[in-house]
Amino acid sequence: MTEADKAKAQLVIVTGLVVLYFIFDASFLLYAAGIIGVLCIAIPVVGDLIVKGWYKIAEVLGAINGRILLSIVFFIILFPVALLSRIGKKKNPLALKRENESSVFANRNHRYTAKDMENVW
C-alpha cells in the first residue's frame, strides 16, 4: 500500500467519525476523530497500524455480510422459487433428463431462411 493510499484511508476514517458525530450528536466521536487525525500526522507508525486495523475490520465485516446477504437472498428468493417449480406441472423444464432415449440430442428439421439471419441476437 502506498503512502497516498494510507493517507486516503486515514482521511476516510477521520471524516467518517466527523459525519457520525453530526448524525448521532455524540461528542466522543469528534474527540476520536481529532485524536486519530493527530496521531496519524504526528506518529506515522501509529497511523499505519490504524489503517491495518481498519482493513482487518473491513475484511471481517465483508466476510460476515457476504454470508448474511447471500443467505437472505437464498431463503427469500431462490428457495420459494424452487418450491414453486417443484409444485408446478412440468416435471422436466430444461429437458435435461433422458426419457426413453439414449441421447439428449433433439433432431430439428428446420430450413433456414433470410429472416432467420436478421437480428440473430
Image: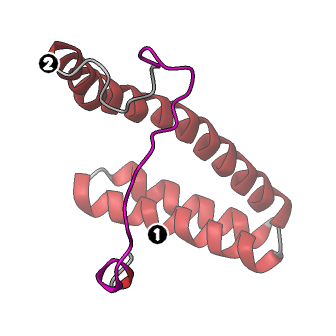
Lower position in the chain sequence, tag 2 or tag 1: 1
Give the quadrant of residue 56.
Answer: top right
Vertical arrangement, residue 7 with respect to residue 87, above or below: below
The reply to whether the C-beta atoms of the residues labelled 2 and 1 are less than 8 Å apart is no
Question: Which SS does the magenta portion mostly show?
Answer: loop
Q: Nearer the viewer, residue 56 or 35?
A: 56
Indicate the position of residue 24 as horizontal and vertical percent values: 24, 52
User: Residue placed at 39% from the left, 54% from the top?
Assistant: 109
How many callouts does the rendering have?
Answer: 2
Q: Is residue 43 above or below residue 32?
A: below
- Residue bearing mark 2: 89
Q: Is residue 85 magenta?
A: no
Residue shown at the point (75%, 61%) measured from the top left: 47
Three-letter code for the amino acid on which mark 1 is drawn: Thr
Write down the region rendered in magenta: 98-116
The secondary structure type at the circle numbered 1 is helix
* Residue 85 at x, y percent in the picture: 22, 22
The residue to which callout 1 is attached is: 15
Check disc 2 and give the amino acid type. Answer: Lys
Give the label on residue 56, or none.
Answer: none
Taking the image as shown, residue 96 lies to the left or right of residue 52, namely: left
Q: Residue at x 49, y 20 (%)?
A: 101
